[in-house]
Amino acid sequence: MERREGKEGNALGGRCRGGYVMENDNTLGRRTWRAKLPAVILVLLLLPAAVLHGTVGQTSNGPGDGTAGEREDVRVCIDMGDGRVFWADITLEEVNTSAFNATERACGSLGLFLGASWSEWGAFVYQIGDMASPPDWSWWWSFYVWNDSGVGDDVGDGAGGGEGFWEMSMVGASSLNLSDGDAILWTPSNHRPLATPDHPFPYTGFRGNLRNTGRVFSPAPTSNDPLWAYDTGSYEVDSTPAGAGGMIFLNTWTGFAAVYDNGTTAWWRPEVRGMSSPAICGDLVVAGSTNGTVYALYRSNGSICWTADINLSPVYSGITSSPAISDGAVYIGVFNESGGNGGLCKLDASTGQIVWHLDNISSVHLSKPAVSDGRVYVGEMGLFNSTAFSYEPPYGLLCVNESDGSLLWRFSTGGPVASSPAVAGNKVFFSSKDGRLYAISLEGAEMWNRSIGASISSPAVADGRVYVGSGGFDSEGRLWCFDLNGSLLWNLTTTGGIQSSPLVADGMVFFATNEANGTIYSLSTDGEEVWRYTPEPRQYILSSPALVDGRLYIASDNGMLYCFAGDVPPTVSFTVSSGESLLEGPEGLDVVDVVAGSEVFFNASNSTDASGPLLSVAWDFGDGTTAHGLVVSHVYSEPGEYNVTLEMADDEGNTYQYTFPVRVDEASKAGGGGLSFLWPYVGAAAVIFLGAAAVYLIRKRGRKGE
């Protein structure tokens, strides 16, 4: 009774300290322990698994959490609107960096002048490089951000391919803070950007830009191994390719081809054919045809947007001039094979309507107009003599007012001009069949000329130098290099005439010879050969090189379009498997968890090299052991973290490495082989046994006390 009263008194009237009942009876303490024992056992049962899998007390700070000192990488594109495109990859050392600050850094690294004014609304950009907004504000610099969500598209078609698109920013560049992986773009408001992060360097038409300088700011291939060759089915191909958004466009004598950049057919348009090299404008591609018609085709599927008949008496070649597209207008020449006057036309780029037609000039054959500062420059071939297959005066270089088509001046030469003039600084450069390279002022006054031999090759102007080819069919040819004042720097003799037009990019000069064994050349800008390639079957090459997204494209009269990609790394695909686990790389491959003592399989059999076979595949497992082969296995004997390196070598002697971490756990901690997975449960059973034994002893002792 006394004990019972004590229990009841403690149970109902015990004193509380800090929320716990202070007990003074051993029997009640034993009962409280017995009541709590199942919960304690449950905690002990779960504890080994929690400790084993490391879920206690773990924290993670992933990328992009805005911590101080974080490095952020952004891409800045400057699209000048005339075919010139510049990219800069900028690393931001501090967070909350504005798009304007990134633009400043990009222009600084590219050597481009950045003109901006400030107001209470932020920074206003009025000039980048040599492109300044005009006084009448007919255009201004627009600011875009890359949207890869796939939702909405304010420029129509993705502006160059892919799922993303450029979206005009709703805030100013000085107010927009960038995040890791962002891309921004500046371009004139009257221009639709074609460059995208996935396809950064479009080639919008013959000579690469509106001033026809033949200078491209893209990486270029350093080897002569074609990535692929596409058979157009044509008996010859004399035009030059254009490309954007992962597609290449080419006019041939049997039809117009659109080819994906993997060498497969996108579409084909048989009624568009001839020598006119295509030009790209937004979602359209424009070219002249043998029937005297200019066609504007949708890039995506080849359907016709509009046509313009500008040569009403075509004989065989039709329109051979290549179009230049500027500020919503198409400029293209007219070749009259019947012997009369030719012409120069300005068309509305959206409708094809003729804005003006200059018809009091002789034929424009092959020459592509250059457009600069409100003027249009084009070569005048002369009046065609169909009996003698020759040309008669007048011939030379024309300068026309861009707005109304009025003739500003004519510079006469001693022979036909089929080349496309290049405008650089205060000079216009062009070659003539009279055997000379000319440099004249913007007002038509001769500044100098140099004897180079008969030429229809359009000069390229880059970094203070002028490059031009010379030579006729099956005759010796030369590539010439002069400075801007006409001093000869070097020349290179080739076995065949150079009638293609040189292209300069990435410290190299590309051109081809028009001979029975037509050969494609790559030289350093100092005239040293980098590589050459003679297509098979061997044929003449009048086509000029084009550079799209770092790949060189050129056609041959054998009907093939060739793609050179240089030292392109292999397409790497590998798996790491152990037991039932399987991880795929290299995309998205993080740390690979395996178990010490278990066999791990490394499989790279799905890796390919587009330019040839993979000559060797080697694995370095990071623990001092290696293996060779596409499929290998390895056993790690000790736990730890190892860096595995996969090294591949192609048939050109290039090697490529890919490294990823492998974490090796002890078998008892990783649920590996044998019965190791039972250890947590064995431990839990031991805890239960000890707990039950403790209860038994307490109860036994309590009985003795009673």
Image (cartoon, rainbow, N blue to C red):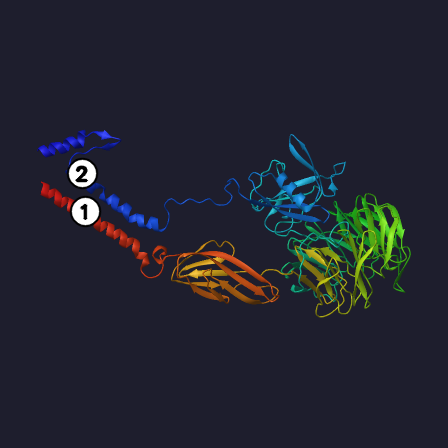
The image quarter containing residue 568 is bottom right
Crowding near the residue tagged with mark 2, few <14, some 14–19, many ≥20 C-alpha atoms within 10 Å: few
Mark 1–mark 2 Cα distance, whole angstroms, equals: 14 Å
Q: Residue at x 76, y 38 (%)?
A: 134
Mark 2 belongs to which amino acid?
Gly
The quadrant of the picture occupied by the C terminus is top left
The reply to whether residue 399 is visible in this rendering is yes
Crowding near the residue tagged with mark 1, few <14, some 14–19, many ≥20 C-alpha atoms within 10 Å: few
Q: Position of residue 314 (x, y in %)?
A: 82, 58
Q: Secondary structure at mark 2?
A: helix
Question: Relative to 502, does residue 75 appear above or below in the rendering?
Answer: above
* Residue 76 shown left or right of residue 30 in the figure: right
The reply to whether residue 571 is visible in this rendering is no
Mark 1 belongs to which amino acid?
Ala
Q: Position of residue 43 (x, y in %)?
A: 28, 45
Question: Relative to 383, does residue 400 appear above or below in the rendering?
Answer: above
Answer whether labels 1 and 2 touch (C-beta < 8 Å).
no
The image quarter containing residue 562 is bottom right
The quadrant of the picture occupied by the N terminus is top left
Residue named by callout 2: 29
Q: Residue at x 40, y 45 (%)?
A: 58
Which of these two is toward me, 277 or 670? 670
Q: Position of residue 101 (x, y in %)?
A: 62, 39
Q: Residue at x 25, y 46 (%)?
A: 41
Q: Secondary structure at mark 1?
A: helix
- Residue 240 marker: none
Question: Relative to 170, does residue 445 appear above or below in the rendering?
Answer: below
Instruction: Name which of mark 1 and mark 2 comes first in the sequence.
Output: 2
Residue named by callout 1: 694
